[in-house]
Image (cartoon, rainbow, N blue to C red):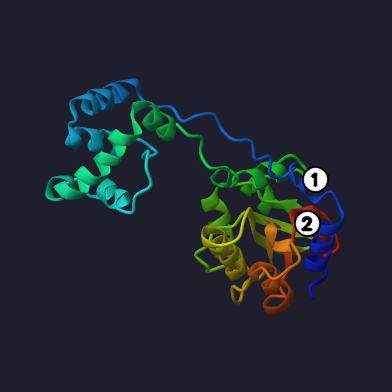
Amino acid sequence: MNYWTELSIEYANQRSYLDDLFQVYPTIPEGIRDIDKERWTNIEKAFKKKNNDILIRELLKLELFPIKDSYIAYLKRDASAIERNPKTINRICGRLYEMGLDKIFERCSEPKETNRQIGPFFRRWTNSKALGIQPVGLEEFTKTKNDAILNGSDKQLMDFAAEELNYKHTKGLDFIGRFNGKYVIGEAKFLTDFGGHQNAQFNDAISTVQAKNVKAIKIAILDGVLYIKGNNKMYKDITTTYKDLNIMSSLVLREFLYQI
């Protein structure tokens, strides 16, 4: 098995992994979502008048619809479908009237899910000089051959990787560094659970490491449930199918970079 994967598993199972990981991913829930006062007034009026058409249209304008229903996404993308499908609208509005205005407001103003907020945290952590050096902008990064970490927008990282490192993959990058004269690229993910969206995130990171003909060391900087020993698919994958790939926790990344 890859040494750094093995070290990450050992760290997660024998040390204060979650306590230490909080330095990288301080997943503090945001406050409630703001709801435009004028829009909420329109929603209240439509609700009280039982005006299904206006009620649906106003609620669809909010960031979060108050009920989970497989047809909501379609209605958001094609508002003309509201007029053509009265039975669907009546069915959804029936559930809304059962909920009541207070519950609708509560649902629409719920904080964003924690796992959707964590994307920027890894870069924020690297920018705190956690890896021993202060990340620099593109101009300074390209000026020398010294050890450096590139601090730039998603597009800047992708453009640099494509033009300088022959990275043709469609997935974005969270890390580009140069250590001991060698470039390192990687994606960073915090996998908070098994299944669904989290499996897709895992697969994205793996596909980056498997990208062909890249002029750089490719790594997947993964944290979370994949290091829990057991029969879960992620753990089995990193210890068998992908055991030779550079998969590691952010908490061992510094050691990895300085031994290159």
Give the amino acid type for the residue marked by disc 2 in the picture: Leu
- Compared with 241, 134 (above or below) is above
In the picture, the quarter occupied by the C terminus is bottom right
Task: Point out residue 169 in the picture as x, y percentages from the top left corner.
Answer: 53, 68
- Compared with 249, 99 (above or below) is above
What residue do we see at 76% from left, 66% from top?
229
Disc 2 versus disc 1: distance between alpha carbons? 13 Å
Task: Point out residue 76 in the picture as x, y percentages from the top left corner.
Answer: 28, 46
- Compared with 43, 77 (above or below) is below
Q: Which mark is residue 184?
A: none
Mark 1: few, some, or many residues within 10 Å (few <14, many ≥20)?
few
Task: Please state if 214 lies on the left or on the right of 41 as rendered.
Answer: right
Q: Which mark is residue 20?
A: 1
Give the amino acid type for the residue marked by disc 1 in the picture: Asp
What residue do we see at 64% from left, 43% from top?
121
In the picture, the quarter occupied by the N terminus is bottom right
Can residue 180 be seen in this snapshot? Answer: no
Task: Point out residue 15 in the picture as x, y percentages from the top left corner.
Answer: 86, 53
Q: Which residue is mark 2?
A: 253
* Tag count: 2
Judged by depth in the image, the label closer to the viewer, 2 or 1, is 1
Quadrant in the picture for residue 258: bottom right
Task: Point out residue 220 in the picture as x, y percentages from the top left corner.
Answer: 67, 63
Task: Looking at the picture, tell me which residue is in the foreground, 25 or 123.
Answer: 25
Task: Please state if 195 lies on the left or on the right of 223 as rendered.
Answer: left
Quadrant in the picture for residue 44: top left
